Image (tube, rainbow, N blue to C red):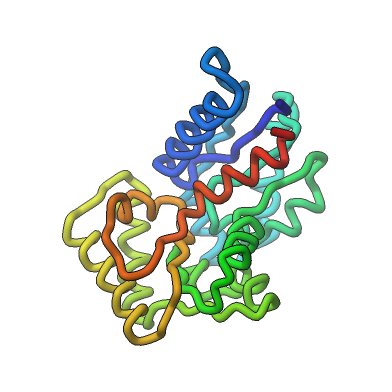
Amino acid sequence: MKKLGLIGGTGPESTLLYYRKFVYEANKRTGDSFFPNLTIESINVYDVLAMCAEQDYAGLTDYLAKAVNNLVAAGADVVSLTGSTPHIVFNQLQARSPVPLVSIIDATCAEVKNQQLEKVGLLGTRFTMEADFFKKPFIEAGINVVVPAANEIEYIADRIYHELERGIVKPQTRERILSIVERMYRDNGIGAVILGCTELPLIFADAQLSVAALDTVDIHIASLFDALGD
């Protein structure tokens, strides 16, 4: 198996999810005596969010390119971001990367097309919900992407920033976010909801919903194995 490099820290909780899920899936696929060799370059999620807020996309690309180069220097054959928001500069980053990058967005879009879904909800950071970078390939494929109402976007973005990025999961936050998904199902007719922030699985674990929650961490990890040749 080729060596994987993960750009983590965006945030720490999702990095832990990626590490745990990836190594145990590799173990399951390959054998009980195997765990994969990988390297994690942990960066600061709050620096990423600040650059997005300032629309400093050149600075963000430079910041992430340094992380990619560190992983390549450590022997990574394939590199992946563990957060959705940094994908706002994915194309610019791929153009500067000496190794392939594997996109969360492309993997998720492929899964939505595979499930033949025509309308999906999208949750994530403010940038993921309000900007076009995540929605674009879905729209090009004829898939309708619905985001929450403005006040709901404000609530979700705030809870991601102040709670989930720090590993804090409050029952009232979980209840409110799940209720937003149910409202989108009733009012907008979504067929599934995309967990477009990789901390959101913390909220949706064991949730009972009227629609499927598409865990982008799981979807992305499956595509990583394809890229790694296993």
113 with respect to 157 (left or right): right
| The N terminus sits in image quarter | top right
Near-viewer residue (48 or 87): 87
Residue 72, compared with residue 182, is above or below; it is: above
The structure residue drawn at horizontal position 17% and vertical position 61%, both measured from the top left corner, is: 172
| The C terminus sits in image quarter | top right
Near-viewer residue (123 or 190): 190
Residue 1, compared with residue 55, is above or below; it is: above
The structure residue drawn at horizontal position 50% and vertical position 59%, both measured from the top left corner, is: 50
88 with respect to 99 (left or right): left
Image coordinates of residue 116 in percent, x first then y, are: 58, 71
Residue 90, compared with residue 183, is above or below; it is: above
Q: Outermost residue, top direction?
A: 33
Image coordinates of residue 173 in percent, x first then y, are: 23, 61
The structure residue drawn at horizontal position 75% and vertical position 32%, both measured from the top left corner, is: 77
Near-viewer residue (102 or 63): 102
Image coordinates of residue 141 in percent, x first then y, are: 68, 75
The structure residue drawn at horizontal position 64% and vertical position 41%, both measured from the top left corner, is: 224
